[in-house]
Image (cartoon, rainbow, N blue to C red):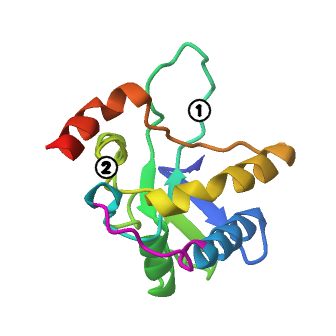
Amino acid sequence: MEKRDSETEFRWQAKDQFCDEIDRMESLLAELRKLPSGQQPDGFRFSDNPFFLKFCPRVVFNPDDKGLFKGIYLPLDLWKRADAAGWFTGKRGGKVLTFDNVGRRINNSEFVGLVAGSWVGTTIEQSAVLGELVRKVLETGKTVTIAIKHASDTADDSKRSAE
């Protein structure tokens, strides 16, 4: 997001890189939705769509910072619905997202809680097929963010399974 006058905004137009990224998410989502849904309670997610967008004001990168950058998290489905409803259409017909016109959003601490609790993200079955995708993305020179549950985090799961 760029600072313009009194607002911080993100602008995009049809067929730009942002739209290409949305198209890639949609293509992968179509493939993920073909997978059978597991029946394990630990695999439950609020949505079968694991994709979120984060819009951040431009900042000067400081490698010593340990916190998350301020920003707007939107589930992909909410972003698509708001865009289709015209929420992001600017005064002259362009596409613009701001802190004022975005409506409902998720902040850093809410997002961290949702991810940490496994309420959002890929299901167990979806995660199993993502390794090849991650390799392909990394080969393009782009970055990937992925969360992994460590073996030490599963001690409680083992107890629960044995009970």
Kind of residue sitting beneath label 2 = Leu
- From the viewer's side, name the closer residue of 112 and 14: 112
Horizontal side of 91 relative to 132 (left or right) equals left
Label 1 secondary element? loop
Q: Is label 2 or label 1 in front?
A: 2
| Percent x, y of residue 61 | 63, 25
Task: Choose top left, top right, bottom left or bottom right for residue 95.
Answer: bottom right
Alpha carbon separation for disc pair 2 and 1: 25 Å
Residue 142 in view of the camera: yes
Residue 98 in view of the camera: no
In the image, is residue 55 above or below residue 34?
A: above
Residue segment shown in magenta: 32-40
| Percent x, y of residue 89 | 54, 79
Label 2 secondary element? helix
Q: Quadrant of the C terminus?
A: top left
Residue that mark 2 sits on: 114
**Image point (49%, 68%), residue name:** 76
Of callouts 2 and 1, the N-terminal one: 1
Asked whether 38 falls inside the magenta stretch, the response is: yes
**Image point (45%, 45%), residue name:** 71
Horizontal side of 21 relative to 85 (left or right) equals right
- Name of the residue lying farthest toward the bottom: 85
- From the viewer's side, name the closer residue of 50 and 93: 50
In the image, is residue 133 above or below residue 161?
A: below
| Percent x, y of residue 58 | 60, 39
- Name of the residue lying farthest toward the right: 140
Label disc, if present, on residue 59 of the rendered structure? 1
In the image, is residue 117 above or below residue 14?
A: above
- Name of the residue lying farthest toward the left: 163
